[in-house]
Image (cartoon, coloured by chain):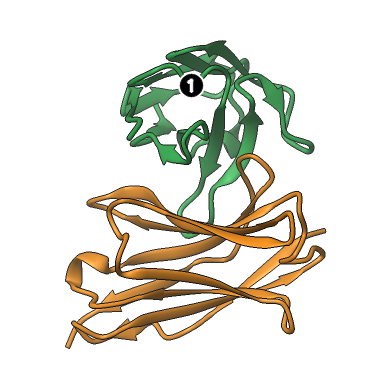
Chain colours: A green, B orange
Amino acid sequence: DIQMTQFPSTLSASVGDRVTITCRASQSISSWLAWYQQKPGRAPKLLIYRASSLERGAPSRFSGSGSGTEFTLTITSLQPDDFATYYCQQYSSPFTFGPGTKVDIK
Amino acid sequence: QVLLQQSGPGLVKPSQTLSLTCAISGDSVSTTSAGWNWIRQSPSRGLEWLGRTYYRSKTWFHDYATSVKGRITINPDTSKNQFSLQLNSVTPEDTAVYYCARDTGTPDYWGQGTLVTVSS
């Protein structure tokens, strides 16, 4: 099974900050990577698919990059609504999620 | 707009069978362009994909995670446009929030989640 790792596990930031989260796959997954945002008590919400494609309705301050085994999610200017936990997920074979990165208020 | 509505008991006794249903609106369980998944989430295991069913070339296919293979069944119900999860021989380790989700590659629409506790 393909394993996913993420870092950092927790990130403290302020409104307006640029935030970057890294995700690594245990083997190449090409660009079959998605990013999700989850808030307490809610289902995960798809933000990015195919490593860099923005899901319809997701704010343009979210962007994704990478291919193969290393990927990043960037939030260009953190907004109050963005404090949440973020998960990467590979869908090469078939689905595995990372452990999550919690973005909290500094 | 696709909506997935989950139903099923929130408490299951050890060794019994966990059963959940996911009713679909805005899409069809028989579509050839999506799969229908069950995913669970617990503090100890994180987000864990359990399995899916999908319809291609007039045939139903099923994929299951290695961790639950042999205990899990996911079935479509075309008459009600829904799909179900059955997980047999549950233990307290199966306590989690269970989600159904549609994938058109990666999961894009999710149900509301059901907390299932395994306890006597």
**Residue at 27% from the left image edge and 69% from the top image edge:** B95
The image quarter containing residue A30 is top right
Using the rendered image of the protein, determine whether residue B37 is visible from the camera's viewpoint.
Answer: no
Residue type marked 1: Ile
Q: Is residue B1 left or right of residue B104?
A: right
The image quarter containing residue A1 is top left
Q: Quadrant of the N terminus of chain B?
A: bottom right
What residue is shown with label 1?
Answer: A29
**Residue at 72% from the left image edge and 83% from the top image edge:** B80
Q: Quadrant of the C terminus of chain B?
A: bottom left
Count the labels in the image.
1
The subunit carrying tag 1 is: A
Using the rendered image of the protein, determine whether residue A23 is visible from the camera's viewpoint.
Answer: yes
Q: Give percent across and percent down for residue B62.
A: 52, 59
Q: Is residue B98 left or right of residue A10?
A: right
Q: Give percent across and percent down for residue B38.
A: 49, 61
In this rendering, is residue B98 above or below B87? above
Q: Give percent across and percent down for residue B36.
A: 61, 59
Q: Give percent across and percent down for residue A45.
A: 60, 45
Pick whichever, A12 or B79, lies toward us: B79
Describe the element under mark 1 as helix, strand or loop. Answer: loop
At label 1, counting other C-alpha atoms closer than 10 Å, the crowd grade (few under 14, some 14-19, many 20 or more) is some
Pick whichever, B30 or B9, lies toward us: B30
